[in-house]
Image: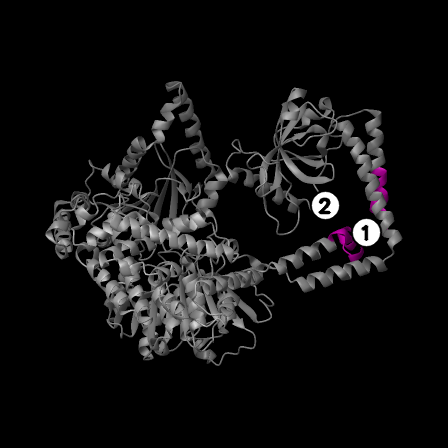
């Protein structure tokens, strides 16, 4: 199933494929497009690099092949992207493999591991989550046997040739200068797109920056739109080639259906050839119109519609869909919800469905009983465990981060064995191991992202829908999207067929990083070095125009203008001004309501000018007649001095943020790189400065931002089709106006335009002189803008931040006036699971000294980020007092940071740094209570409590190491005892993967 050239162009713009002259002064990129291979290969190469490889064996940098003996063979024929990746690995050069979830990236990672084994070297495999590390350890151990595991809470075979670890562990090894790294030849970064994560993305960047240049890297990623940029960054910082092998090929094509809630039937909106079926989409829209009419007839108060889309019936819709999927033999199915509680409710609403045979039920029963053998009797009776068995026996399961880890892993194993037919999951299931299904269902197209309910992005949709379609088993995968309201076609199109999201850096400076860099004796890496080499800085500099060139170009233009004869240019400019004045007079005549209203239909393009402000072209939405008294009450109306009784609601391109909270909208300047959004702005008739012959379709509902932005895209498309400007309505020919005064004005404009067009400067439109004159006023403005942008460079911002953070460290006694790390700083260097400043403050101000180890465990739990509880916390004095001390210390640290000019909101800092929701639970557990009793007063999910407790154990061990580093033996013992008191029972039950 080779991709057609046109398909490739959509994914990889033509200019990106044929090779660039230079990426920067440092690198050049050579690229190759191979249409028959269903993959794109590109390579970023440092300038001056020459390859010493034998071309008959290894091919060239831009066309890698491998004709030697392979380190590993496969029982199947490799896909083109796998072949190219293997060839890059055999050249001993880094490679980024960007492909869909089910494409087979793991085969590339396995080849790198086999190469390291062949060459008697070690290889590290890093993944973003402990759970993924456990799964990967099991998978690789079956293949290679000599495999170890290092996560925060488990270490197995640390001397193995292949070590699986979380990225945090790798960063720690790099900071400590671990001996292991001297034997490592390859590091594999799985799920590298996790670098976008706001909280933890920086760990990947630091690890990549710190890796010794001799080590080569394999990056595995879901499809991303800026893979080349990432490879250029690697090439830039490590001065080694980095290949990109990108494929959006799906071994199993997908069909995308929409199911309207409360309706019936499925509508195929995108077929397996990625063609959008507009006819079906329109039929789908009709169902909502009919439904709304029916609902309106049924109920005068509008409640019928609400009931239909609410969970009561949402559940019945989901029940309908799952039942239909089973009847059509489309199982196994994954039903994605964006809420953990919803997942569980949907699964429980399937009580009447049963998908497993008697034989399968018995197998599930046996596997379940074996899995819970590691738990004690009390824990086996937990509702979270007992309620799961009847569901699992019927082939139904739930998977989300709040489940007990044991149950979560059990569900994964049963799903892989085909014993779970309907899995209700959150989006975390779409990460990591390849666990495909035949069908994927989305219960909603919107998700809450912490700020607002928004449509899911194309990157998220690609990741989740990628679970549909099992290679070698299904002819095609099926995606079903449930929608409960009319949806704009462009939004759906962008979601299903949109480009994958780019990888954007979330780099930030932490005290942990600064202190670790300051305390490294060799001084090879400084905080400045890390900032300068971050992907963040690379992306920023790449986006900046080359200011030197731009300024000199502008100066050249000005010089040409001066040399070309000022008089000629002035004469030309005078003609332009005269035309503008006559046009203004003519528009005043045309804007009489009786003349113009007939032409102001929805979709007409009009130009708006308000005094000296040019709003550019907008789109008429509708015209409203207002009583003159009401005009003054329109705060956002663009008012004319002469007044008018008509308001034209017009979609105009506004700057971001304007027109919200009732503030007056501001036009978005037509400067390159400026982005804005479309808003409906009330415009009075006299402010229309031109009418175009063109009209475009306007969506019926303009409330969603996506609908308005679709109009902006249509406008921009027209601008490319009419580079000379939009054709205007002719008053006589198009509008039928015979008034002699208007006819005279039209004739004047035509005469002046003839003079203008025959002027020598008009014919030399492409020469410097005319362009420079128009831009002369802009030149100084542009130079100022660019220079201030340089002054505001990210590097400078980070330098200022570094200076301010260093001041904080001095004030708190972590470093001295010369930047030498003191005792307190040496302790903070070892703490990265919780707030390092706050933790060391409590160690050094005696708070921990006054507590027993149970209180220490409870207080330390406040440092670990996790779910918030809705239950009012009731704490005894034995916990309330230390909590108060912790909050006071956090407040003091926040205030010191503010004094040192860091942007810190004191109350927000305290709230984020101190999370007391599980203090009581941890205290009870540490004292020896059973799990059921310890958690009875909290509403937080069991799995979240266990995950937090395991991170807490990691944190206590870091505190223990910090106490040891500063010679505090009593504290060291107390932290050890606190950790020991947690490590038992269900909280630390072994993973089923280990």
Q: CA distance from mark 1 to mark 2?
A: 14 Å
Label 1 close to label 2 by CB (< 8 Å): no
Which element is circle 1 on? helix
596 sits to left or right of 66: right
Q: State the extent of the magenta-drawn residues as a range.
A: 750-778
Q: Which mark is residue 763?
A: 1
Percent x, y of residue 867: 32, 48
Residue 81 as seen in the image, left or right of residue 559: left
Query: From where the camera sits, is residue 12 visible?
Result: yes
Residue positioned 72% across, 45% down in the render: 724
Residue at the far right in the pictured view: 567
Between 42 and 867, the one lying in front of the other is: 867
* The C terminus - image quarter: bottom left
| Residue under numbered circle 2 | 724
Precedes in sequence: disc 1 or disc 2? 2
**Disc 1 crowd, CA 10 A, few/some/many (<14, 14-19, 20+):** few
Q: Is residue 475 visible?
A: no
Image spot of residue 780 (x, y percent): 74, 55
The quarter of the image holding the N terminus is bottom left
Position of residue 979 relative to residue 359, above or below, is: below
What residue is shown at x 71% (from left), y 23% (from top)?
593
Q: Secondary structure at mark 2?
A: loop
Question: What residue lies at 77% left-to-right and 25% top-to-bottom?
Answer: 737
Principal SS element in the magenta part?
A: helix
Q: Position of residue 142 (x, y in %)?
A: 23, 67
Q: Is residue 393 above or below residue 210?
A: above
Q: Is residue 760 magenta?
A: yes
Q: How many marks?
A: 2
């Amino acid at each position: 199933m080779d991709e057609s050239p046109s398909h490739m162009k959509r994914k990889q713009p033509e200019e990106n494929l044929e090779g660039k002259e230079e990426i920067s002064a440092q690198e050049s990129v050579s690229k190759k497009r191979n249409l028959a291979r269903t993959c794109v290969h590109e390579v970023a190469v440092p300038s001056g690099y020459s390859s010493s490889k034998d071309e008959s064996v290894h091919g060239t940098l831009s066309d890698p092949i491998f004709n030697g003996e392979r380190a590993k063979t496969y029982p199947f024929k490799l896909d083109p992207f796998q072949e190219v990746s293997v060839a890059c690995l055999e050249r001993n050069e880094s490679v980024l493999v960007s492909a869909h979830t089910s494409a087979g990236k793991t085969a590339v990672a396995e080849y790198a591991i086999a190469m390291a084994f062949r060459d008697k070297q070690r290889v590290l495999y890093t993944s973003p989550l402990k759970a993924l590390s456990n799964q990967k350890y099991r998978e690789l151990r079956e293949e290679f046997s000599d495999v170890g595991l290092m996560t925060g809470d488990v270490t197995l075979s640390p001397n193995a040739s292949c070590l699986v670890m979380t990225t945090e562990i790798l960063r720690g090894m790099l900071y400590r200068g671990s001996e292991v790294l001297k034997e490592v030849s390859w590091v594999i970064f799985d799920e590298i797109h996790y670098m976008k994560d706001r909280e933890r993305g920086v760990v990947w960047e630091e690890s990549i920056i710190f890796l010794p240049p001799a080590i080569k890297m394999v990056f595995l990623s879901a499809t991303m739109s800026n893979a080349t940029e990432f490879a250029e960054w690697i090439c830039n910082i490590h001065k080694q080639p980095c290949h990109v092998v990108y494929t959006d090929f799906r071994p199993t094509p997908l069909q995308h259906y929409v199911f309207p809630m409360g309706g019936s039937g499925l509508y195929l909106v995108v077929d397996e050839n990625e063609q959008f079926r507009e006819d079906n989409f329109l039929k789908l829209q009709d169902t909502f119109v009919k439904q709304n009419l029916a609902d309106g007839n049924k109920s005068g108060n509008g409640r019928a519609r609400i009931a239909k889309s609410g969970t009561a019936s949402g559940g019945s819709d989901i029940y309908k869909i799952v039942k239909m999927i089973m009847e059509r033999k489309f199982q196994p199915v994954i039903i994605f919800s964006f809420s953990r509680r919803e997942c569980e409710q949907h699964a429980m609403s399937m009580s009447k469905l049963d998908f497993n045979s008697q034989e399968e039920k018995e197998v599930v029963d046996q596997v379940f009983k074996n899995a819970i053998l590691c738990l004690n009797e009390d824990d086996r009776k937990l509702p979270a465990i007992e309620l799961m068995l009847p569901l699992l026996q019927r082939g139904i399961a739930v998977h989300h981060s709040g489940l007990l880890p044991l149950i979560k892993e059990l569900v994964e194993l049963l799903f892989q064995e085909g014993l779970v037919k309907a899995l209700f999951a959150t989006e975390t299931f779409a990460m990591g191991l390849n666990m495909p299904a035949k069908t994927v269902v989305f219960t909603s197209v919107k998700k809450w992202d912490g700020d607002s309910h928004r449509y899911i992005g194309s990157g998220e949709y690609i990741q989740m829908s990628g679970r549909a379609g099992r290679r070698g088993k299904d002819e095609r995968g099926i995606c079903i999207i449930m929608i409960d309201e009319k949806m704009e076609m462009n939004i759906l199109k962008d979601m299903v067929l949109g480009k994958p999201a780019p990888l954007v850096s979330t780099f930030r400076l932490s005290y942990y990083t600064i202190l670790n860099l300051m305390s490294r004796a060799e001084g090879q890496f400084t905080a400045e070095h890390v900032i300068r080499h971050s992907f963040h800085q690379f992306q920023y500099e790449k986006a900046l125009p080359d200011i030197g060139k731009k300024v000199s170009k502008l100066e050249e233009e000005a010089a040409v203008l001066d040399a070309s004869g000022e008089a000629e240019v002035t004469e030309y400019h005078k003609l332009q001004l005269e035309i503008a004045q006559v046009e203004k007079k003519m528009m005043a005549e045309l804007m009489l309501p009786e003349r113009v209203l007939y032409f102001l239909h929805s979709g007409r393009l009009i130009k708006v000018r308000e005094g000296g402000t040019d709003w550019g072209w907008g789109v008429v939405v509708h015209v409203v007649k207002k009583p003159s008294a009401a005009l003054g009450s329109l705060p956002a109306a663009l008012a004319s001095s002469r007044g008018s009784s008509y308001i034209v609601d017009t979609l105009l391109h506004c700057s971001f943020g304007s027109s919200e909270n009732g503030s007056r909208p501001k036009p978005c300047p037509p400067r390159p790189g400026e982005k804005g959004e479309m808003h409906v702005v009330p415009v009075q008739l006299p402010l229309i400065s031109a009418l175009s012959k063109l009209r475009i379709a306007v969506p019926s509902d303009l409330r969603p931002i996506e609908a308005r932005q679709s109009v902006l895209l249509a406008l921009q498309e027209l601008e490319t089709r009419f580079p000379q400007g939009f054709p205007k309505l002719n008053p006589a020919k198009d509008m039928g106006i015979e008034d002699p005064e208007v006819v005279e004005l039209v004739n004047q404009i035509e005469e002046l335009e003839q003079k203008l067009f025959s002027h020598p400067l008009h014919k030399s439109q492409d020469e410097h002189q005319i362009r420079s004159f128009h831009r002369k006023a802009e030149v100084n403005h542009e130079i100022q803008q660019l220079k201030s942008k340089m002054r505001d460079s990210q590097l400078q911002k980070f330098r200022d931040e570094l200076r301010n953070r260093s001041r904080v460290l001095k004030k708190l006694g972590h470093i001295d006036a010369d930047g030498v790390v003191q005792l307190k700083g040496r302790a903070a260097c070892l703490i990265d699971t919780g707030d390092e400043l706050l933790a060391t403050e409590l160690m050094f101000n005696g708070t921990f000294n006054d507590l027993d180890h149970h209180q220490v465990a409870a207080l330390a739990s406040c440092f670990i980020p996790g779910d918030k509880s809705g239950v009012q916390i009731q704490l005894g004095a034995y916990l309330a007092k230390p909590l108060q001390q912790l909050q006071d210390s956090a407040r003091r640290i926040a205030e010191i940071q503010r004094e040192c000019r860091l942007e810190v909101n004191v109350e927000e800092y305290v709230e984020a740094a101190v999370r007391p929701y599980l203090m009581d639970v941890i205290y009870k557990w540490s004292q020896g209570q059973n799990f059921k009793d310890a958690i009875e007063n909290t509403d937080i999910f069991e799995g979240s409590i266990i995950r937090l407790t395991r991170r807490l154990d990691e944190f206590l061990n870091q505190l223990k190491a910090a106490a040891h580093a500063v010679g505090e033996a009593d504290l060291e013992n107390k932290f050890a005892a606190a950790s020991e008191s947690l490590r038992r029972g269900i909280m630390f039950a072994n993973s089923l993967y280990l």
